[in-house]
Amino acid sequence: MIKIFTDGACSGNPGPGGWSYIICKDEEIVQGQGGSVGKTTNNRMELTAVIKALEKIISFEDKRFQIISDSAYVVNAVNNHWIGCWNQNNWKTSKGEDVKNSDLWKMFLNIKNKCERLGKLITFEKVKGHNGNYFNEWVDSMARNEVINQMRGVKDET
């Protein structure tokens, strides 16, 4: 199974943000990427990291993937099937409010469905942030560095 660690970070909320992912096979990093956005939120960066990772794995021959994130927002939306409910309810919450970040959730759903049509099995696992998980700490550092780069004026990559 390929493990994919994702993270997003933001300085202020909204503020300059960064996202990152690393793809691990047999406990070794085989791919990593990050990017930044000028004005965003932490949740948008968490979700962007997952979207970018899913876009990357389309070309992989492997079939089993595990997305590992410290974002309850992302993992709960997938594992508790909130996304399907939002989609069925025309991107409204159970309270009738607009789903936040629906533009990114729609992108997520499209790319996840494309992966699944290609026979890829994708599971999601929540890990506690800043709790000593080596790869989670690494991807967190990458995302925070992307925020710093954005604040220094490095170009957006998303």
Image: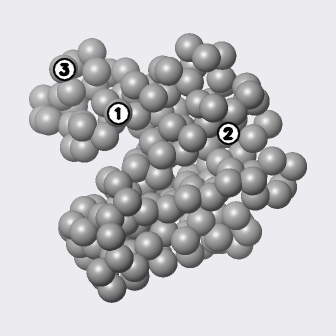
Residue drawn 30% across the image and 80% down it: 153
Residues at marks 3 and 2 touching, judged by CB atoms closer than 8 Å: no
Residue drawn 18% across the image and 28% down it: 92
* Viewer-side residue, 90 vs 97: 90
How far apart are labels 1 and 2 at the CA level? Answer: 19 Å
Which residue corresponds to mark 3?
90
The image position of residue 113, as x and y in percent, is 48, 20
* Disc 1 crowd, CA 10 A, few/some/many (<14, 14-19, 20+): some
Q: Please name the amino acid that badge 1 sits on.
A: Met
* Viewer-side residue, 36 vs 10: 36
How far apart are labels 3 and 2 at the CA level? Answer: 28 Å
Question: Is 29 displayed left or right of 93 in the figure?
Answer: right
* Disc 2 crowd, CA 10 A, few/some/many (<14, 14-19, 20+): some
Which residue corresponds to mark 1?
107
Secondary structure of the residue carrying numbered label 2: strand
Q: How many marks?
A: 3
Secondary structure of the residue carrying numbered label 3: loop
